[in-house]
């Protein structure tokens, strides 16, 4: 009786475990089937062209891909240094009475719905970017020979730059929470060994703690990239959603792939139009798989050949 119960329990939990990959496979299969007419009609030109004409049934998502890459890159560049610096302060330098309350607030920020961020961005961040931040960037960095092209054009607030900023704010709590946990998991011997050799506190952090925690920090950054790639409502409210042209200026109102789906899904009045919208979701799914694969390779490469507990 006991063996039969064990076998039944093992079969039950195995079936539950298989639900996760089966669900992912079912989602992927459904998306591929719905997107297949668009894939066979446009091929690779779907990702390289920017003509999106529902009347003539000609679709190219190049501008959407570009907008997604720009906003995600901006978000990571803005959020990662802040998250790593704040995590170092909380784990290495902050008084103990501050660590608990600040960590609790960070966890709360991570669970705020994206629509709340979007409304805050639309009513607070957009006017601030339009009246203060973007004119200041244009007056300073906009005068430089090469970088200045990024800040050309009229500052309207609803643009790719604001989309990147709102994404950076949204992924910051996740990056900070993950980085903090990774730094706390570093063995105390890492710090003690460096300090015992005469190193300062900063030298111990920069030469012993951070290299040891690098794989986890990279993993946290990948989590931020994954959320930034798929974020919909917050970006839709602040990115502009009005231009399908690829421009070198961050002040250009644009689209991301997720915002394009949100704005146009209900307008798909033909089978090919619907298929073209679903193909955007297929691209997002493939990007998510690729990002996680690259993250695993980076983490394995960072961990390879390094003995546990070694000071590097």
Image (cartoon, grey):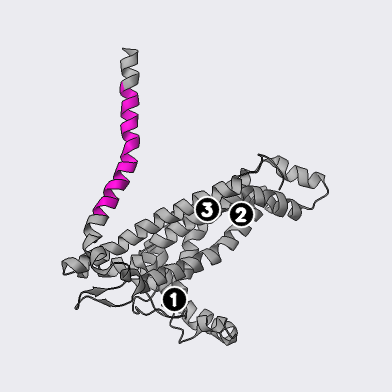
Identify the secondary structure beneath mark 2.
helix
Residue 241, placed above or below residue 112: below
N-terminal-most mark, 1 or 3: 1
- Characterize the local packing of mark 2: few (<14), some (14-19) or many (20 or more) Cα atoms within 10 angstroms: many
Q: Which residue is mark 2?
A: 87
Q: Who's the residue at 64% across and 43% down the image?
A: 305
Which residue is identified by label 1? Answer: 126
Residue lying farthest left?
270
Residue at image position (41%, 73%) is 123
Q: Disc 3 vs disc 2: Cβ atoms closer than 8 Å? A: no
Residue 301 visible, this orientation: yes
Q: Please give the range of residues in magenta.
A: 8-31
Please give the name of the residue rendered at 36% of the width and 60% of the height, measured from the top-left corner.
Answer: 284
Task: Residue 241: give its label.
Answer: none
CA distance for labels 2 and 1: 28 Å
When asked about the image quadrant of residue 142, the answer is bottom right
* Element at label 3: helix
The quadrant holding residue 66 is bottom left
Location of residue 165 in the rendering, given as x and y in whole percent from the top left corner: 49, 69
- Name above or below for residue 311 compared with residue 250: above
Task: Find residue 220 and name its label.
Answer: 3
Q: Residue at x 26, y 69 (%)?
A: 42
Q: Earlier in the sequence, mark 3 or mark 2?
A: 2
Nearest to the observer: residue 205 or residue 116: 205
- The residues bearing labels 1 and 3 have C-alpha atoms spaced at a distance of 28 Å
Q: Is residue 116 left or right of residue 33?
A: right
């Amino acid at each position: 009786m006991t063996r039969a119960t064990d076998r039944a329990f093992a079969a039950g939990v195995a079936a539950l475990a298989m639900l996760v990959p089966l669900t992912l496979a079912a989602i992927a299969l459904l998306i591929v089937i719905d997107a297949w007419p668009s894939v066979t009609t446009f091929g690779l030109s779907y990702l390289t062209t920017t003509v999106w004409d529902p009347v003539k049934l000609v679709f190219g998502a190049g501008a959407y891909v570009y907008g997604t890459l720009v906003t995600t890159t901006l978000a990571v560049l803005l959020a990662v240094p802040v998250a790593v610096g704040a995590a170092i302060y909380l784990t290495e330098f902050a008084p103990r009475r501050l660590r608990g309350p600040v960590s609790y607030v960070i966890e709360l920020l991570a669970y705020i719905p994206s629509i709340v961020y979007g409304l805050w961005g639309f009513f607070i961040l957009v006017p601030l970017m339009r009246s203060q931040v973007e004119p200041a960037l244009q007056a300073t960095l906009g005068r430089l020979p090469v970088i200045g092209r990024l800040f050309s054009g009229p500052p309207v607030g609803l643009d790719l730059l604001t989309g990147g900023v709102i994404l950076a704010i949204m992924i910051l709590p996740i990056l900070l929470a993950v980085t903090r946990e990774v730094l706390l998991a570093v063995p105390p011997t890492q710090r003690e060994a460096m300090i015992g050799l005469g190193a300062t506190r900063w030298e111990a952090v920069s030469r012993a703690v951070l290299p040891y925690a690098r794989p986890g920090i990279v993993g946290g950054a990948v989590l931020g990239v994954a959320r930034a790639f798929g974020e919909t409502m917050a970006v839709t409210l602040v990115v502009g959603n009005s231009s399908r042209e690829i421009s070198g200026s961050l002040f250009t109102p644009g689209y991301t792939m997720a915002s394009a789906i949100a704005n146009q899904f209900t307008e798909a009045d033909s089978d090919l139009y619907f298929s073209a919208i679903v193909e955007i979701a297929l691209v997002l799914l493939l990007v998510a798989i690729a990002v996680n694969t690259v993250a695993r390779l980076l983490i394995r490469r960072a961990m390879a050949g390094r003995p546990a507990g070694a000071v590097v």
